[in-house]
Amino acid sequence: MRILKKIIPIIIVVIIIYASFLFLSDINQISEKIINFKFEFIPIIVILVIFSWVIAYTRWYILLKNLQIKIPHKINFQIFMVGASLGITPGKISDFER
């Protein structure tokens, strides 16, 4: 546990340094990409993201069913979404927990 307490601040500092280099070196490219983004793709992107959540929840449900863990769908979905909420963090930090 002591090693983890030492490593986490180092990882955070490295991520901040990397992100700042990335942001400062490519600011013109990033702003150009944002300006030229085709916003008509947003509905397609949202639909695909929601579809991927449905697939992930189905896998989750099948896994619990195979383990013979019975949880009502409403509570099961809430538990899944709480865990999945960390999946939208930068770098998908929650993937380290799985």
Image: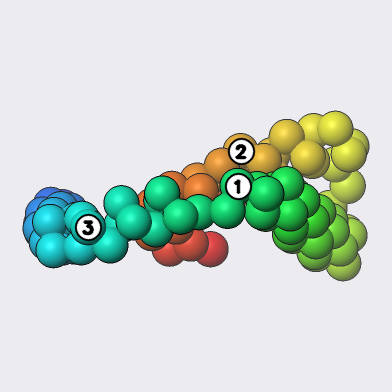
Quadrant in the rendering for residue 74: top right
Amino acid at pointer 3: Asn
Q: Residues within 10 Å of mark 2 (few under 14, many from 20)?
A: few
Q: Which residue is mark 1?
A: 39
Q: Is residue 92 visible?
A: yes
Numbered mark located on residue 82 in the image: 2
Mark 1: amino acid: Phe
Task: Mark 3 and mark 1 in contact? Answer it, CB < 8 Å.
Answer: no
Task: Left or right? Give the position of 67 relative to 25.
Answer: right
Depth check: 86 or 18 in front? 18
Q: Which color scheme did the rendering employ for the protein?
A: rainbow
Looking at marks 3 and 1 on the same chain, the residue that comes earlier in the sequence is marked by: 3
Q: Which of label 3 and label 2 is nearer to you?
A: 3
Q: Residue at x 12, y 56 (%)?
A: 24
- Relative vertical location of residue 94 with respect to residue 77 in this rendering, above or below: below
Find numbered disc 2 in the image and state the secondary structure of the residue it sits on. helix
Work out how far the residue at label 1 is from the one at label 2, CA to CA, in angstroms: 29 Å
Q: Dot 1, crowdedness within 10 Å: few (<14), some or many (≥20)?
A: few
Mark nearer the N terminus (1 vs 2): 1
- Image coords of residue 66 (percent x, y): 87, 67
Image quarter of residue 23: bottom left
Q: Secondary structure at mark 1?
A: helix
Q: Residues within 10 Å of mark 3 (few under 14, many from 20)?
A: few
Q: Residue at x 73, y 46 (%)?
A: 43
N-terminal-most mark, 3 or 2: 3
Say whether residue 11 is visible: no
Q: Amino acid at mark 2?
A: Val
Question: Measured from the top left, where is residue 80 in percent x and y?
Answer: 69, 45
- From the image, tell me which residue sits under label 3: 28
Q: Alpha carbon of mark 3 to alpha carbon of mark 1: how far?
A: 20 Å
